[in-house]
Image (spheres, rainbow, N blue to C red):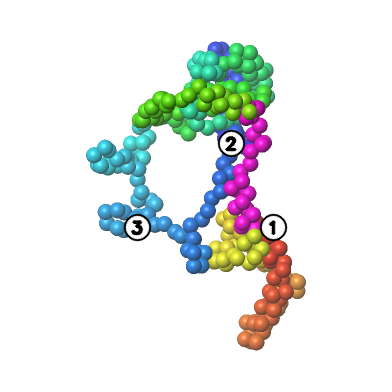
Amino acid sequence: MRAIWKGSVSFGLVNVPVKLYSATESHDVSFRQVHAKDGGRIKYQRVCSIDGEEVPYSDIAKGYETEDGEMVILTDDDLAELPSTSSREIAVEKFVPSEQIDPMMFEKSYYLEPEKSGAKPYALLRQALQDADRMAVVTVALRQRTSIAVLRVRDDVIVLQTMMWPDEVRQPDFTIEPGDVKDSEVKMAHMLVETLAGDFAPSEFEDDYAGAVETLVKTKIEGGEVKKTATSTKSSGEVVDLLAALQKSVAAAKSARGEAPAASDDTEDEKPAKKTPAAKKTPAKKAAKKAPAKKAAAKKAS
């Protein structure tokens, strides 16, 4: 992991220099929007809704839309005057009982690693949180903006979890009518709860959807159901012909060093193709011989 932030935790007169790491990552399956006919990627243009003209990125500004639909343009100078902070301090405001924090307020999680000089005070803070069974409510400046967060202990590591501001948590605008539940039904519900009671083990759950998508894509690749587009060799997360890409890379590297291409690079066979049309069949013939290797490479790429 790579540290994304460095600073210190301060509680009272104690200062703990730490590094911040993202504790989570998304494994959501993402798809590209493509033309069903040929697999070409769909591109989007930045078009002005008033004059219909495409707008270059350099002419795009930030706008704040009012409730009545008016648009207020904010310049870079305007944004520079807004209150911001670049403090490198995680300031502990208070220690509160863990049950007082609604999990709905949690936003993103980070691991805190102590610097070498902060190992002892880090252990002290960790022990204090565990013994008191409390969370530390803190304020921290991330991405030029102050956020509220909590510190808690997970597997001997202090975790910082940023939180939503109170006005960002929505309240339900509907009411639940009390149901006419019979005592026998309540008793049966209790029996069901006891039957399914157990300890939470995350490893027991699996993302079946992601695995099914991977299997489906692999099956289509093995069946040759791959659209060859002009961007297929780009490293954009799409399936590519690795063998062809490696051959081109080797040829380009040798050319940059001024080396003559070897016979095994198939470059000598390509020279006659420029002279006579009949010789053009030679590369095609060799490409056909390499077809199994290309298929294997594409399979690995999946």
| Type of amino acid under label 1 | Lys
Q: Is residue 201 magenta?
A: yes
Give left or right: position of 262 versus 74.
Answer: right
Which quadrant is home to the C terminus?
bottom right
Q: Which residue is mark 2?
A: 24
* Residue 63 in the image, given as x and y percentages of width and height: 32, 42
Q: Badge 2 local density, few (<14 within 10 Å), some, or many (20+)?
A: few
Q: Earlier in the sequence, mark 2 or mark 3?
A: 2
Q: Is residue 43 visible?
A: yes
Q: Which residue is mark 3?
A: 54
Q: From the viewer's side, name the closer residue of 184 and 237.
A: 184
Q: What's the magenta region?
A: 196-218
Q: Earlier in the sequence, mark 1 or mark 3?
A: 3
Q: Is residue 113 magenta?
A: no
- Mark 2 lies on a secondary structure that is loop
* Residue 71 in the image, given as x and y percentages of width and height: 27, 42
Work out whether 212 lies above or below 40.
Answer: above
- Mark 1 lies on a secondary structure that is helix
Q: CA distance from mark 1 to mark 3?
A: 40 Å
